[in-house]
């Protein structure tokens, strides 16, 4: 086997591989000799069929396996011998007449091309100076959360027949919706319990029932939103004939030990502690989001190296598909497609650059992701598909690439933890409003 480097421009590498027909035939004979004792052929005792006969029967199939093995071996050798790591799967471009190669009559000759990962020196993370915003949990937040829990336990009692419905009242209604005078699928309901102001129905519906009394018939006119999930109804005007069977008023639920017991806890003190801990956890996640964003900005500024075009283009295509399937932000609506593509191309470059930097830092630091963390993530992912858990688990277990996608964000967080432990991180007290500001998108975006 001969492996020759044809070209090396930037991150682009091309190799020429040649395997003589004699080597292919030697490997074929060796393989056939291996299987000779395993096959039972009519007219021959087991293991006594001549290799020449086996070659006629199995030669092409076995040769195909040999060629695949040699291609994999030669491709790996081309890069590993030069201490290069492909940025994507290298693919061969065959020059030989493959029919003759399979027949053992021609040399196997092909080129293999791939971009390689860049070689760079990551910044010294111990020298990074970062500010981590932190905020104390206001008592008001705890009180509001307790009130929401109490509201979720609200019960309703019938009001007098002459009582007019107001916001937060519950109405028991029958309704039939029509478009152009014709009922439509999904537009009918009987005995539906509707809380006014809860936003259970499309905008405008609940508002028109304020003031209704038990026994009233109300004609409700609405327009379905343009982005309504049922496309055949989106943007259309509809009229609902609504019969109000009963008007019920909310009965206040006290914030006390009984409320705690309703949600499975022993006392109000325990409920308050749980609520406080949950809010504190949310605040900590917000703080981490801000300091992580600052960290990524610092790493992005500290590194400038050539990026594999294939990785950048793949990342851009993924981003662009998301952009096309979502509504543009107000600031982007007046931009041309070329302007948007240029901006998102920079985002793709940032993501790829930061991904490579974090990977290199993690590699040098020997950062690992415990198997139990991956299994926990796998189970959580499966649970997000109710009724299909088994199929999801099997899919990931049979697809190494899919498992790698599960591992990647876990590895990233481990590397971020590693860096934050070594960087100079100063806490800065801020208001709740400041802490809750969006740190500009996800982990590796703009």
Image: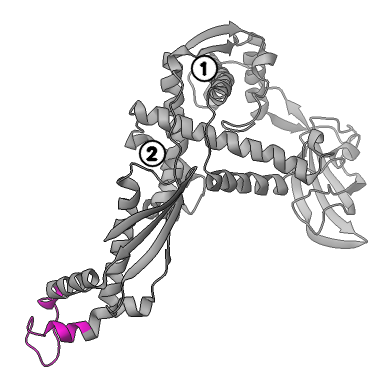
> Badges 1 and 2: C-beta atoms under 8 Å apart?
no
Camera-side residue of 428 and 419 = 419
- Quarter of the rendering containing residue 146: top right
Camera-side residue of 314 and 195 = 314
Q: Position of residue 391 (x, y in %)?
A: 44, 56
Seen at 18% across and 83% down, the residue is 54
- Is 278 positioned to the left or the right of 28 in the image? right
- Is 218 positioned to the left or the right of 365 in the image? right
Mark 1 and mark 2 lie on one chain; the one further toward the N terminus is 1
- SS at circle 1: helix
- Quarter of the rendering containing residue 143: top right
Mark carried by residue 374: 2
Tell me how far mark 1 sits from mark 2, CA to CA.
26 Å
Q: What is the magenta range?
A: 35-55
Residue 27 painted magenta: no
Which residue is denoted by mark 1 in the rendering? 277
Seen at 88% across and 58% down, the residue is 178
Main secondary structure found in the magenta portion: loop
Instruction: Say which quadrant the C terminus sits in.
Output: top right
Residue 38 sits above or below residue 175 on the image: below
Seen at 47% across and 30% down, the residue is 357
- Is 204 positioned to the left or the right of 15 in the image? right
Seen at 36% across and 31% down, the residue is 363
Q: Position of residue 293 (x, y in %)?
A: 58, 23
């Amino acid at each position: 086997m001969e492996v020759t480097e044809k070209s090396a421009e930037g991150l682009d590498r091309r190799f020429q591989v040649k395997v003589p027909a004699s080597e292919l035939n030697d490997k074929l004979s060796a393989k056939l000799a291996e299987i000779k004792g395993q096959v039972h052929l009519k007219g021959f005792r087991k293991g006594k069929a001549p290799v020449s006969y086996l070659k006629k029967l199995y030669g092409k199939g076995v040769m195909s396996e040999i060629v695949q093995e040699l291609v994999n071996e030669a491709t790996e050798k081309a890069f590993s011998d030069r201490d290069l790591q492909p940025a994507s799967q290298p693919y061969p471009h065959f020059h030989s007449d493959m029919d003759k190669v399979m027949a053992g009559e021609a040399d196997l000759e092909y080129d293999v091309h791939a971009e390689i990962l860049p070689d760079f020196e990551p910044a010294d993370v111990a020298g990074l100076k970062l500010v981590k915003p932190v905020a104390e949990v206001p008592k008001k937040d705890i009180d509001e959360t307790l009130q929401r829990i109490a509201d979720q336990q609200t019960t309703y009692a019938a009001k007098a027949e002459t009582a007019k419905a107001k916001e937060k009242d519950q109405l028991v209604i029958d309704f039939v919706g029509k478009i152009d005078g014709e009922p439509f699928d999904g537009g009918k309901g009987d005995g539906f319990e509707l809380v006014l102001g809860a936003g259970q129905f499309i905008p405008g519906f609940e508002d028109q029932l304020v003031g209704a009394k038990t026994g009233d018939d109300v004609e409700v006119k609405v327009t379905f939103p343009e982005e309504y999930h049922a496309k055949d109804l989106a943007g259309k005007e509809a009229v609902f004939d609504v019969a109000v069977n009963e008007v019920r008023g909310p009965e206040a639920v006290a914030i006390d030990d009984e409320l705690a017991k309703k949600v499975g806890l022993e006392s109000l003190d325990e409920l308050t502690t749980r609520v406080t801990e949950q809010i504190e956890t949310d605040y900590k996640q917000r703080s981490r989001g801000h300091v992580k964003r600052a960290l990524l900005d610092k790493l992005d500024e500290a590194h400038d190296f050539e990026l594999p075009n294939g990785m950048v283009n793949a990342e851009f295509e993924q981003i662009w598909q998301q952009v096309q399937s979502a509504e543009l932000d107000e600031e982007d609506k007046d931009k041309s497609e070329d302007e948007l593509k240029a901006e998102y191309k920079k985002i793709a470059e940032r993501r790829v650059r930061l991904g490579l930097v974090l990977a290199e830092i993690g590699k040098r630091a020997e950062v690992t992701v415990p198997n139990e963390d991956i299994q926990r993530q796998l189970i959580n992912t499966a649970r997000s598909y109710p009724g299909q858990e088994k199929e999801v688990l099997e899919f990931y277990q049979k697809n190494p690439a899919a498992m790698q996608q599960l591992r990647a964000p876990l590895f990233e967080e481990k590397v971020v933890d590693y860096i934050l432990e070594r960087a100079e991180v100063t806490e800065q007290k801020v208001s709740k409003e400041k802490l809750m500001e969006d740190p500009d998108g996800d982990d590796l975006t703009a």
